[in-house]
Amino acid sequence: MLKLISNLISYLKNKWKIQALSEILFSYLKKIKKIYVVLGSMLIFFIFFFFGIKESSDLDKDEKVKISVNLDEKKKLKSDDLSENTDVEIEKLKNKKATKDNLSKSKKSPEKKEKKPAVKNQRETQQKKKALEPKKKHENKNEINRFYTPEEVVNNLHAGLKKVSEKISDSPTDLINLVKNTYNTEKMITKIIGDTWKKTNKKDRQEIVIIFQEYIAKNYFKRFKKITNPTFKYKESKKISEKLMLIKTILVVDKEDVSMNYLLIFDKKQWRIFDVLLAGSISEIATKKSEFSSFIRDGKISPLIDALKKQNSVLND
């Protein structure tokens, strides 16, 4: 009897355990089901949301394409309208111009026809002026550009002296212009006269510069008229300072070499000869200073002006 009771009790205990376990499992499964249900619903929501956005973007694209197509069609229509309008306006303008031309032709008076000879006269006067212009340039052929180099200034002087020896130039007038354009005679005479230059009035200064130019040119003319076939050889150039250059040359006469060096100064934006060194060392300024000193008296250069005028008249003969 006791055995039966103990077996029953153990059976009941085991049964109770099984029920408890089943309840626990059942509750756990319920919880898992809830989780799956929530996850499934969320997944379904995201699927609907994604496809909804995609459809809306596709619709937006279609609408944009339609709008662009409509705009292009409108632009084409406007351009066609404009082109048609412009063609019509151009034709109208052409017609207006044609009518104006016809009216102007019909309204031309005989007075305008009579004025034609005046136009011819104007043309003739213009042609005469053009014909005179080359002559003016020919007269100024000895002028040197103020930006020429020192070497070109010396070469220009030598070319003029060769013309005298070759009898191409028969008068000293060409040489006077050449000296004017290659020599800075004002600087030379200033150094020759010295302190007396400051005391000299403007009129005497201008006069002595012109007379001294003539004096240099006529001396050149007298010397080179007697020389046959002179040749000038360039030797070298030396920069003394920013505004002073020394050009060394050799004059060959009858197979004899005579060194002629030129000191050039840059003044008033142009290079001009300032001094000539004969035989390499004899300064033209120094020799003329000693020659002219006796004619400068009491701070006046009028006696020197008179002496140079007489000398120039003698050189003419």
Image (spheres, rainbow, N blue to C red):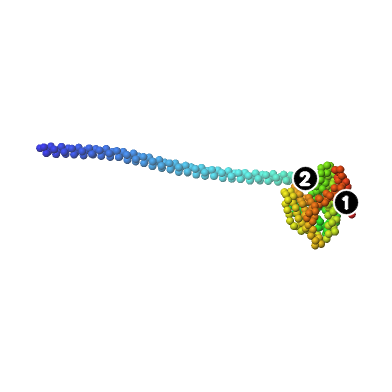
Q: Secondary structure at mark 2?
A: loop
Name the foreground residue: 138 vs 316. 316
Q: Mark 1 or mark 2: which comes first in sequence?
A: 2
Around disc 2, counting alpha carbons within 10 Å, would you say few (fewer than 14), some (14 to 19), or many (20 or more)? few
Determine if residue 123 is in view: no
Q: Residue at x 82, y 51 (%)?
A: 287
Compared with residue 52, is residue 239 higher up or lower down, i.e. above or below? below
Q: Residue 240: where, in percent of width, then height?
A: 73, 51
Around disc 1, counting alpha carbons within 10 Å, would you say few (fewer than 14), some (14 to 19), or many (20 or more)? some
Determine if residue 278 is in view: yes
Amino acid type, residue under disc 1 in the picture: Gln
Viewer-side label of 1, 2 = 1
Q: Residue 94: where, in percent of width, then height?
A: 68, 46
Report, in whole angstroms, how far the alpha carbon at label 1 lies from the one at label 2: 73 Å
Q: Residue 304: where, in percent of width, then height?
A: 86, 47
Amino acid type, residue under disc 2 in the picture: Lys
Q: Residue at x 20, y 38 (%)?
A: 17
Q: Residue at x 14, y 39 (%)?
A: 7
Q: Residue 116: where, in percent of width, then height?
A: 80, 48
Q: Secondary structure at mark 1?
A: helix
In screen coordinates, is 4 left or right of 96?
A: left
In screen coordinates, is 288 left or right of 50?
A: right
User: Where is the N terminus found, in terms of image quarters?
Assistant: top left
User: Where is the C terminus found, in terms of image quarters?
Assistant: bottom right
Q: Are marks 1 and 2 in contact (CB under 8 Å)?
A: no
Query: How many numbered badges does the structure rendering display?
Result: 2
Residue position for label 2: 108
Residue position for label 1: 311
Q: Residue at x 73, y 56 (%)?
A: 236
